[in-house]
Amino acid sequence: MARTVDPERHEARRLVIIDAALTRFAADGYHGATTAAICREAGIGSGTFFHYFPTKLDLLLAILELGTGEVEEWFAAQEGRADAARVVAEFVERTAREATDPRMPGFVRAVGAVVAEPRVAAALERDERVQAHGLCGWIEAARRAGEVRTDLPAERLSQWVMVVLDGYLARLAADGLDAAAEREQLGDTVARLLAPAGA
Amino acid sequence: MARTVDPERHEARRLVIIDAALTRFAADGYHGATTAAICREAGIGSGTFFHYFPTKLDLLLAILELGTGEVEEWFAAQEGRADAARVVAEFVERTAREATDPRMPGFVRAVGAVVAEPRVAAALERDERVQAHGLCGWIEAARRAGEVRTDLPAERLSQWVMVVLDGYLARLAADGLDAAAEREQLGDTVARLLAPAGA
Amino acid sequence: MARTVDPERHEARRLVIIDAALTRFAADGYHGATTAAICREAGIGSGTFFHYFPTKLDLLLAILELGTGEVEEWFAAQEGRADAARVVAEFVERTAREATDPRMPGFVRAVGAVVAEPRVAAALERDERVQAHGLCGWIEAARRAGEVRTDLPAERLSQWVMVVLDGYLARLAADGLDAAAEREQLGDTVARLLAPAGA
Amino acid sequence: MARTVDPERHEARRLVIIDAALTRFAADGYHGATTAAICREAGIGSGTFFHYFPTKLDLLLAILELGTGEVEEWFAAQEGRADAARVVAEFVERTAREATDPRMPGFVRAVGAVVAEPRVAAALERDERVQAHGLCGWIEAARRAGEVRTDLPAERLSQWVMVVLDGYLARLAADGLDAAAEREQLGDTVARLLAPAGA
DNA sequence: CATGAATGAGTCTTCATTCAT
DNA sequence: AATGAATGAAGACTCATTCAT
């Protein structure tokens, strides 16, 4: 009788809810996406929802952390590579690929609606730190290899790479850009940004 | 006889409310900023609010339109100038100056929370069209003057300038960038983006 | 300078407001008719409204009292007549004629929405008393003349005449009846109600 | 597995709310009866209210439809009877019995306050059609049996029966009539209305 | 007198969250 | 574990009424 807690089943369902939430948040915004709508999308009852997440906000945070974790893992997987400039370029490509999910820009906007919440601010900060730190290391290495301009410190350069990446995501949301057509251009823009002074 | 209608007083008060709303929206987001809080900030009663704006959403739209109008006027004022590349640079500077208002990034995020609303989407689209159209003309002129790369059409280039501007605003909000320190860098980044191929 | 209070002008304007209110109340109900709408209909400012009536409710009461007064006057004008049964019939006709104003049924319903208000209840009671009392006297006289049934006291008979009159008004409102076509039938119905037992 | 859905419990509670609303509407009118007051009367939380009815207006409509349904059922149950005139009389009695609920007249007035609402108008129209149609059939039959006057078509006669019924309800509300004492008189009045010409 | 801008108390309604089953 | 009925705090908005001009 005693249903042993099945961690796999639990995790699978958790992911279903996260995916449903991503869809609803992206389409309707954080406040526009009611827990009821998320439950409907996930095919669960409202009571079940709160078995998995104590709060609607916790669900948002879970999605955020999932993303941060993936970035962390990605950088961890690059450890030891010698072609620093290539790593930076591949990170940009990776981000562009992520942005291919049509829900991404909407989700980013949804998160923006709740940054006043300290826990969201913290999660966002951590995400940015992970990205900035990851980028910074490789940009520094590329700089030493003479593949990147030296008039600015690596920290600021990685911030500016993130400026372009964030802007790219924002313009996708605004329908100003076509994700498929502009992925290449994104790489070129970052290249121009990082190019040594007299290239 | 006593015509109490004082259009100036009316307009002044309207601006007070708009300013208060800008503050609250930026700090708490669209949904986080209650009409009560906006009224408190503006020093008016809740009834007065709805004397000036039929809806909280209409207030947001009024702010948006105010911004669009200023951009329109700015471009109208440049009409006839011959130094196209300089105009583009000045537009970027102008945007950076606007971004100096610490409420700007927060407000942009607040707007993002309501894009699902058709009227907001329309207002946003109009704003982007005005910016894109204004930029596009001058970039085209600068291109003909050989001051801008020719491998991409002016339309796409203006989109990419907006990528950088949007990203700049977003990173300011994320505290990744320091508005005062990076304004110059912004100009340089756009310059690199637009520079002719073999510069 | 000293504008002497012009009682005629004042009374005229008062009637304009009353007329406008009758229109709005009839069309939108008591709560549906906002003071703003009544002012618009009357062509006055909202401030002026409260110069003439301390309260929206007082306006309703004024209309009610106007009606009661007219009934009172009508009965006073019949004083001394000898054809009692004819007077009763003429009162019914008079009521049917009043009901010709397309706003009447709507207004009656509007009043119904506020009977919980003691002052309205009192005004209504007074109106009914005036009608019942007026009718009762003539029915009594007609009864003595053998023109009206004697199995019921005059008080109850006048109540039943009012049942038919009230029902007539209600059905007009419900579009069940056509005012023009059924006025004659109304007289016949009351006649049947009052006819001596073996007629 | 635990299907919590208990349709009986749901329906029971729905009826509790309807009953509470009938009480409040009757006492305070449609606008005077706040949802809060209805909830208090029903012993439920404000949130529960909207679990059962999407809108205060929908609650009113539900009551209306309940009444219409009962009339429909009543007429359906008479199907096949041969004593047409008796059926008409019994319908009048039935209506008088309904009017015994002291909340009835007040509720009717409450409905009157919202007839401007199209949905209410439609529900009311349907109710009247059901009553008129039901009555009309039996009056026609009675007419053919020589038990009812033939100088007016059955349609108009049923309208006039409704005039008396509506008026009866209205006078009860006005305290002009005593429900217990006058029920018999109601039957007599309708009988006089329908009696063949030379009775 | 006439005006209409300003007011705030009061309403309906939404929605995240709890809990008995 | 899963469910969904129940909850009530919170928020946008309406409108009769006041008052300075």
Image (cartoon, coloured by chain):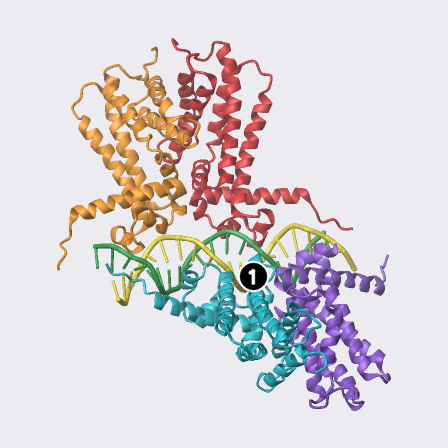
Chain colours: A purple, B cyan, C orange, D red, E green, F yellow
Vertical position of residue B15 compared to residue E11: above or below: below
In the rendered image, the quadrant that contains the C terminus of chain C is: top left
Of residues B12 and D57, the one drawn nearer to the viewer in this rendering: B12
Residue at 49% over, 31% down: D98
Of residues D53 and B199, the one drawn nearer to the viewer in this rendering: B199
Residue bearing the label numbered 1: B120
- Label 1 neighbourhood size at 10 Å, few (<14), some (14-19), many (20+)? many
Vertical position of residue B191 compared to residue C81: above or below: below
Residue at 50% over, 53% down: D36
Q: Name the kind of residue labelled 1 in the image.
A: Val
Left or right relative to A160: residue D26: left
Label 1 secondary element = helix
Left or right relative to D37: residue F20: left
In the rendered image, the quadrant that contains the N terminus of chain C is: bottom left
Image quadrant assignment for residue C147: top left
Left or right relative to A24: residue C56: left
Residue B111 in the image: state x and y as whole percent: 57, 67
Image quadrant assignment for residue D9: top right
**Looking at the image, can residue A1 be seen?**
yes
Residue D156 in the image: state x and y as whole percent: 44, 20
Give the chain letter at badge 1: B
Left or right relative to B26: residue A85: right
Vertical position of residue C23 compared to residue D150: above or below: below
Residue at 48% over, 73% down: B77
Residue A148 in the image: state x and y as whole percent: 75, 86
